[in-house]
Image (cartoon, rainbow, N blue to C red):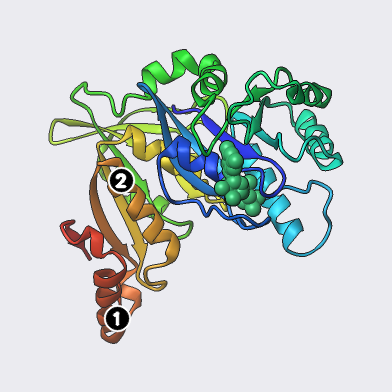
Amino acid sequence: MKPVIALVGRPNVGKSTLFNRLTKSRDAIVADFAGLTRDRHYGDGRLGDREFICIDTGGFEPDSSTGIVKEMAKQTKQAVAEADAVIFVVDIRLGLSAHDSDIARYLRSVNKRVHLAVNKAEGMSESPLLGEFHELGMGEPHPISSAHGQGIRSLLDAVLEPFEDATEEFGAGPQQDGVIRLAVAGRPNVGKSTLINTWLGEERLVAFDMPGTTRDAISVDFERNGQKFKLIDTAGLRRKGKVFEAIEKFSVVKTLQAIADAHVVLLLLDATQGVTDQDAHIAGYILDSGRAVVVAINKWDAVDSYQRETLQRQIEQRLAFLKFAPLHN
Ligand SMILES: Nc1nc2c(ncn2[C@@H]2O[C@H](COP(=O)(O)OP(=O)(O)OP(=O)(O)O)[C@@H](O)[C@H]2O)c(=O)[nH]1
Ligand SMILES: [Mg+2]
């Protein structure tokens, strides 16, 4: 599975600029005033043939107790919880602040691998100003310039080093062994588990394997007409006795990892909810990943003909970039 890296730091230090460089996207909002990135942004990163998932977060104030800042802190903590490693970004031009020390204290408490990136250090890789960041107790500071692309490779080498073996096996896309890997993606409650249970009830279940930790994807092997399939759990599914049930929390990371490991992704929509922003995001991501995609609309029986027409139009508009994909209802 691809390692997941969260970018954390106080406002305006250049997290989004670093995210854009790592993912080579224009996705994250970059601006010159603090507090602009409010949600978590996810993207695919690659260094040589090593792939990873990167999460950009908003400016982090771990101790904040009110308003939007508190919400951003919550988002950041979730990103850290989902991550295998954290890049803690600080700003060499502003120097070390009490705020950085608060973040360092928080990061030490969560027991993740943390790498300290000292940003905006273009042409300053030998600067004595780097010295003060040792105080954070986060190991050797890596001078980088996100804007100019300096020091990024050596930072990533350090971050990805512990995952070397894992990415060799999983980073290269789905395995090519004749088994068709299928992922079912969709928001919680669209009916993923019901669909899968119905499906597997009819087919021969060959094996079931559930790795130790909850963050690992689970998979189910089955056969149909002599073709072997492997169903990859995205998010929001877990096994309870003989059936699958949906878990409350939607895990973007699991969805992204499942898509990366799949040949075909079934995107399940909910007819009663229409096409939501999150549906559109997942669809865009599947498309970017170059996987085959099938869009399915569940709960078709629960809507009347007027709603069906509205939905059809919504799909044409909001998922216009998927026009080539087959639509089943
Ligand atoms: N000189 C210099 N400026 C940079 C560098 N990286 C980012 N910046 C600038 O710093 C400002 C803030 O960058 P962002 O990437 O938006 O910072 P952020 O940490 O994502 O900010 P929030 O999301 O608001 O917390 C922008 O004006 C960037 O152009 C760098 O390596 N060198
Ligand atoms: Mg940002």
| Amino acid type at mark 2 | Asp
Instruction: Mark 2: give few (<14), some (14-19) or many (20+) Cα within 10 Å.
Output: few
Q: Is residue 303 left or right of residue 19?
A: left
Image quarter where the C terminus lies is bottom left
User: Which residue shows up at 18% across the image and 62% down it?
Assistant: 323
In this rendering, the answer to whether 237 lies above or below 108 is: below
Q: Which mark is residue 225?
A: none
Helix, strand or loop under label 2: helix
Q: Which amino acid does the dot numbered 1 rest on?
A: Thr
Q: Nearer the viewer, residue 276 or 188?
A: 276
Report whether residue 239 is seen: no
The quarter of the picture where residue 276 lies is: bottom left
Q: Is residue 289 left or right of residue 157?
A: left
**Would you identify the image quadrant in which residue 178 lies?**
top left
**Rendered residue at 35%/75% (across/down):** 302
| Earlier-in-chain disc, 2 versus 1 | 2
Kindly identify which residue carries mark 2.
Answer: 288
Mark 1 sits near ligand 2, with its Cβ under 8 Å away: no
> In the image shown, does 15 or 248 lie closer to the viewer?
15
- Within 10 Å of disc 1 (Cα), the crowding (few <14, some 14-19, many 20+) is few
Q: Say which of marks 2 and 1 sits in front.
A: 2
Which residue is depicted at the point 75% across and 21% down?
A: 128
Nearer-the-camera pick, 320 or 192: 320
Which residue is disc 1 drawn over? 310
The extreme right residue here reads 98
